[in-house]
Amino acid sequence: VLHEVDTLGRDYGQVHFIVDRGAERGKSVYLHRGQLLDEDIAEMGSFRVTSMARTVADVACASDFAGALTVVDCGLRRGVPRAQLEGLAARLAGSRGIANFRSALGHADEKAETAGESLSRARMIEMGDIPLPRLQHEFHSPGGIFLARSDFDWDGKVIGEFDGRGKYTA
């Protein structure tokens, strides 16, 4: 919440903590057993929180593929280096949900601008028979005048929009 990462259907009724020993789930608190390195910790005002990169990794591991892709796309878009996320994926090997995090990391793209675009792309990937689109491609007239930018594009033959009606009629 404090990092304002894009998520799909997350339950904000619980606060999650990573602790050295034990694991416990209560009504409003969820304690996860794990280890944090200094690089995993950030300060936001008077709060010590997990870093943006660690937060992305943890939320991705706790999500299905679409949720993981959404949060990883957001992390990349906000400047988390892919190499840092790859390092976390290696470090978290064997963790619950690591397969979704790794798969999302393999498909993630910082050009996805919204959670809806990430969700749409996740569904395309899950279907398996839709070629992956270019993201945020700009179209120009033969004279170089900007015409449009699409959320999804397949070689200029087909374009797709997640939020097109609101984008173009507002």
Image (spheres, grey):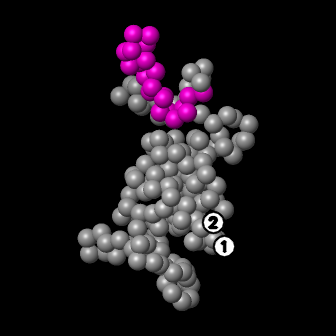
x then y, percent, for residue 3 = 37, 61
Q: How far apart are marks 2 and 1 (CA)?
A: 7 Å
User: Dot 2 corresponds to which residue?
Assistant: 98
Q: Split into 4 quadrants, where in the image is the C terminus?
A: top left
Residue 15: name its quadrant: bottom left
User: Dot 1 corresponds to which residue?
Assistant: 94
x then y, percent, for residue 119 = 56, 45
Up the image or down, 120 lies above or below 154; here it is below
Residue 129 appears in view: yes
Whether residues under marks 2 and 1 lie with C-beta atoms below 8 angstroms apart, the answer is yes
Q: Give 21 or 103, whichever is nearer the viewer.
A: 103
Q: Split into 4 quadrants, where in the image is the N terminus?
A: bottom left
Counting the numbered discs, the total is: 2
Residue found at x 34% / y 76%: 48
> Residue pushed farthest left?
45
Q: Is the magenta stretch mostly helix, strand or loop?
A: strand
Q: Give 144 or 50, whichever is nearer the viewer.
A: 144
Queried whether the magenta region covers residue 87, the answer comes back as no
Residue found at x 56% / y 25%: 159
Please give left or right for residue 134 compared with residue 42 in the image.
right
Helix or strand or loop: what does disc 2 sit on? Answer: helix
Dot 1 crowding, Cα within 10 Å, few <14, some 14–19, many 20+: few
Q: Give 4 or 82, whichever is nearer the viewer.
A: 82
* Mark number, residue 116: none
Residue 10 appears in view: no
Q: Which amino acid does label 2 sit on?
A: Ile
Q: Which amino acid does label 1 sit on?
A: Gly
Q: Give 14 or 7, whichever is nearer the viewer.
A: 7
Which residues, given as a range, are shown in magenta?
A: 134-154
Dot 2 crowding, Cα within 10 Å, few <14, some 14–19, many 20+: many
